C-alpha cells in the first residue's frame, strides 16, 4: 500500500516529492517510525502556510522498501513517470530520524546538483559543516531515470568511532553513524531522543521550504559536471591506449566552463526570466542525472547495488587488462564506443541548455 497526499503550490505546478517508507524490521521505532512522524509534522506545519507556497509538495509513504528492495517507489516511478519528469524539482527522502546519540551531520547524501544546497541547509540549521557524497542505489532512490535530483536519506548519525562495527556500517550503508539497534528487535521507542528528532525535523522543514519558495531553483550543475570530468580522467588513465575517451573528456571540460559562467549569471536572474530559467535548469538535470546515476535505460530500474558514475564506460577498466589483439578487447571497444556516444550526446545536449541559460540571464 501507498499513501500519497499533496499541498498544491500557488504559483507553479511543479512540486517537491518528500518520501519515506512505512515498512519496518521488527518494531521499527527509528526505522522508520520517527521518519514518518517527521513527514507528518512537516506536512502539518506547511499546511498552515499553504497559501504562501510557490511550488507544491507531495508526501509519499512507501511500502516495499526492505522486503521489496524499493519496489514501492519503483512502482510509483513507473506509473507517475511523465509528471515526475515534467514537474518534480527534487526528491527529498527521509529515513531513521531522531536516534539517541545521533548528533553528527558531517556526511550527507545528495546528487551532485543538489549537494551544495544540502550542505548549506545543514550548516544553517545545525551549525555543523557537512560534506555531500554520492548516493548508492538505496533509500528509495527510484527516480533517477526520470532525471529527478535527490537529497538526503539517513541524515543524523552517531559520531564516527574507530571500531570494527563502525567500519562495517560504513561499508554497508555508506555511513558509520547508524546505531547498533538498526534492523533489530531493539529498535524501540526508548532509543529515540526527542531533541534530535526535533532538530532533524527542522532540517527537513527548512529544506522543503527553500525548495518550495526559491525564485530560482538551487541546482548546481557545475559540481555535477566536475564530478563527471574527474571520473572520465580516472577512466582514461586506467584505459591508457586501449580506448580513447578524449572526445567525452573534452566535451565535459568545456561544459564545466559553461556551467561556471551559468552559476555566476544565476545570481542575478531578471524576474521576467525566472520561469524560463527554472524550466531549463530542470531540463539539465533530466540530462545529467540519468547519465551519472543509471546504467542507461531511463525506463527500467537498476539493481539496488552501488552504481558508479558513467556506468557503461566503466568497461574501460576491464579493457585495460585484456589481450590487446584478442576478441574480448574488440568486443569491449565496440561497447565502449556506444557508451562514449551516449555520454557525448548527453554532454552536447547539456551544453546547448547551458547556452540557453546564458542567453536568458544576459
Image (cartoon, rainbow, N blue to C red):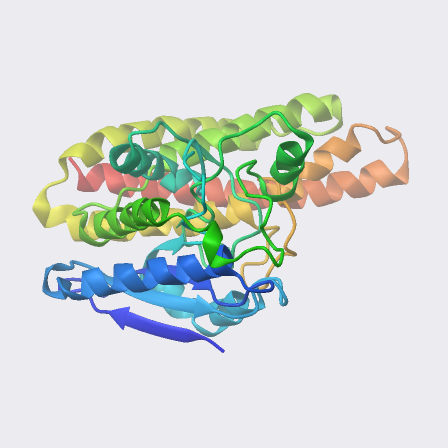
Residue 296 horizontal side relative to residue 270, left or right: right
Q: Which of 208 and 225 is in front in this view?
A: 208
Residue 329 horizontal side relative to residue 89, left or right: right
> Where is residue 160 shown, x and y percent of the image?
53, 29
Q: Residue furthest bottom?
A: 1
> Where is residue 233 shown, x and y percent of the image?
58, 24
Which residue lies at the image location 61% right of the left edge and 25% below the top edge?
162
Report whether residue 331 is seen: yes
Q: Nearer the viewer, residue 210 or 197?
A: 197
Q: Nearer the viewer, residue 300 or 239?
A: 300
In the rendered picture of this protein, how many numbered marks are placed on residues?
0
Which residue lies at the image location 32% right of the left edge and 28% below the top edge?
260
Residue 130 horizontal side relative to residue 50, left or right: right
Which residue lies at the image location 71% right of the left edge and 34% below the top edge?
316
> Where is residue 12 shown, x and y percent of the image?
19, 62
Report whether residue 143 is seen: no
Q: Which of 51 and 12 is in front in this view?
A: 51
Identify the image quadrant of residue 10: bottom left
Identify the image quadrant of residue 299: bottom right
> Where is residue 91 shown, x and y percent of the image?
39, 55
Q: In which quarter of the image is the C terminus?
A: top left
Which residue lies at the image location 66% right of the left edge and 36% below the top edge?
165
Q: Is residue 246 above or below residue 1?
A: above
Q: Which residue lies furthest to the front in this view?
A: 190
Q: In this view, does 290 lie above or below 45?
A: above
Residue 155 horizontal side relative to residue 89, left or right: right
Q: Is residue 10 above or below residue 133?
A: below
Amino acid at each position: 500500500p501507498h499513501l500519497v497526499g499533496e499541498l498544491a503550490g500557488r504559483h507553479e505546478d511543479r512540486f517537491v516529492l518528500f518520501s519515506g517508507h512505512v515498512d519496518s524490521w521488527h518494531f521499527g521505532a527509528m526505522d522508520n517510525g520517527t521518519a514518518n512522524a517527521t513527514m507528518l509534522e512537516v506536512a502539518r506545519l506547511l499546511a498552515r502556510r499553504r497559501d504562501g507556497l510557490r511550488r507544491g509538495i507531495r508526501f509519499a509513504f512507501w511500502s516495499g522498501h526492505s522486503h521489496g528492495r524499493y519496489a514501492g517507489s519503483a512502482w510509483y516511478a513507473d506509473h507517475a513517470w511523465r509528471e515526475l519528469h515534467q514537474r518534480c524539482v527534487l526528491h527529498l527522502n527521509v529515513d531513521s530520524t531522531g536516534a539517541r546519540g545521533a548528533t553528527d551531520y558531517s556526511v550527507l547524501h545528495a546528487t551532485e546538483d543538489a549537494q551544495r544546497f544540502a550542505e548549506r541547509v545543514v550548516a544553517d540549521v545545525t551549525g555543523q559543516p557537512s560534506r555531500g557524497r554520492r548516493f548508492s542505489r538505496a533509500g528509495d532512490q527510484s527516480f533517477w531515470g526520470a532525471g529527478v535530483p535527490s537529497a538526503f536519506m539517513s541524515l543524523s548519525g552517531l559520531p564516527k568511532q574507530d571500531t570494527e562495527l563502525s567500519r562495517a556500517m560504513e561499508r554497508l550503508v555508506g555511513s558509520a553513524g547508524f546505531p547498533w539497534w538498526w534492523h533489530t528487535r531493539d529498535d524501540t521507542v526508548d532509543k529515540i531522543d526527542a531533541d534530535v528528532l526535533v532538530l532533524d525535523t527542522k532540517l527537513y522543514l527548512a529544506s522543503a521550504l527553500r525548495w518550495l519558495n526559491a525564485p530560482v531553483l538551487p541546482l548546481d550543475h557545475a559540481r555535477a559536471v566536475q564530478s563527471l570530468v574527474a571520473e572520465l580522467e580516472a577512466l582514461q588513465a586506467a584505459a591508457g591506449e586501449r580506448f580513447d575517451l578524449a572526445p567525452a573528456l573534452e566535451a565535459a571540460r568545456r561544459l564545466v566552463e559553461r556551467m561556471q559562467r551559468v552559476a555566476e549569471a544565476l545570481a542575478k536572474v531578471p524576474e521576467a526570466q525566472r520561469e524560463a530559467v527554472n524550466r531549463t535548469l530542470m531540463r539539465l538535470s533530466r540530462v545529467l542525472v540519468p547519465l551519472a546515476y543509471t546504467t542507461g535505460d531511463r525506463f527500467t530500474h537498476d539493481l539496488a547495488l552501488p552504481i558508479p558514475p558513467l556506468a557503461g564506460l566503466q568497461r574501460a577498466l576491464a579493457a585495460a587488462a585484456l589481450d590487446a589483439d584478442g576478441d574480448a578487447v574488440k568486443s569491449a571497444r565496440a561497447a565502449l564506443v556506444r557508451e562514449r556516444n551516449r555520454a557525448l550526446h548527453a554532454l552536447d545536449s547539456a551544453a546547448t541548455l547551458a547556452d540557453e541559460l546564458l542567453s536568458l540571464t544576459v
